[in-house]
Image (cartoon, rainbow, N blue to C red):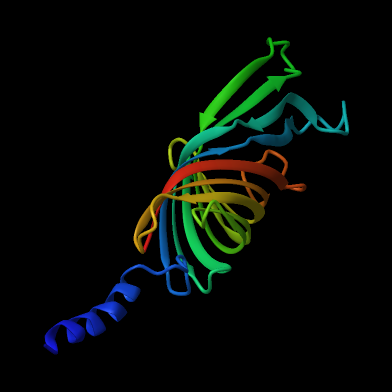
Amino acid sequence: MLTLPLVVALSSPLAAQAVRSDVPHGGSVEIVGAFVTSGGYDAGTSQALETSNPQVKSTPLTLFSGEGRLRPASGVEARLGVYLSPQFSVEGGLQFTKPMLRISLSNDFEQAPDTDAEEQITQYVLDGTLLYHFARFSNGHASLFLAGGGGYLRQLDDGNESLTTGSQFHGGGGMHYWFGSANQRLGLRVEGRLAVRNGSVDLDTIDNHHLVPTFSVGLGYLF
């Protein structure tokens, strides 16, 4: 006669632990894979100079001028995050894109027509980010967040012969939408960021700060 009450008493705590109502909570882990689009920027100007005959001209001779632009590009990114509490989480991410660097050549000394030269850049961004999850709705399935952090930038030319490294600081926000109500769940993540990059590919080595917007859509797994 005592068997049924004992089973009920033991199963009630186990059922309560099986599905938590405060997911995500402190200790929850999120893995994200996403498609990302990274904006371009004006990559400065430069001139090819040749030393003039000092008896004829004291200033260098300009052979041609170049104006650069790094084109927008699409790629992929992966992110791994840990929730410190239901409101705060920290994450690391790796972004991979292959933008095109276009250089417009003009003012040729020998009167050659203006032309464009292009080179593909392999670009990696490794970053760390703090997220603040400030609003939840739709019975906890959807949430909004703000994000901010910094990272390391690495850019290689097409032949992997020239390496450019720099840093970035970024801020932005986005939305999660989790499917289902289990402790382990899949979800959609949409995010926009604006990054300030220093030391990225640029023809002008003096002023090398650029604003680069990014937008990503991906799937997340929470457990």
Question: Would you place residue 114 above or below residue 11 in this image?
Answer: above
The number of discs equals 0
Percent x, y of residue 1: 11, 88
Side of 211 where 11 appears, left or right: left
Question: Would you place residue 7 above or below residue 68 in this image?
Answer: below
Percent x, y of residue 149: 62, 62
Question: Which residue occupies the foreground of this view, 20 or 114?
Answer: 20
Percent x, y of residue 16: 34, 74
Residue drawn at point x = 52 percent, y = 55 percent: 139
Percent x, y of residue 211: 71, 44
**Quarter where residue 56 is shown:** top right
Question: Which residue occupies the foreground of this view, 67 or 145?
Answer: 145
Side of 2 where 150 appears, left or right: right
Q: Is residue 180 visible?
A: yes
Residue drawn at point x = 79 percent, y = 27 percent: 61
Residue at the front extreme of this rendering: 1
Residue at the bottom extreme of this rendering: 2
Q: Is residue 98 visible?
A: no
Residue drawn at point x = 23 percent, y = 83 percent: 10
Question: Which residue occupies the foreground of this view, 6 or 164?
Answer: 6
Residue drawn at point x = 46 percent, y = 53 percent: 94
Question: Would you place residue 14 above or below residue 63 in this image?
Answer: below
Question: Which residue occupies the foreground of this view, 128 or 215?
Answer: 215
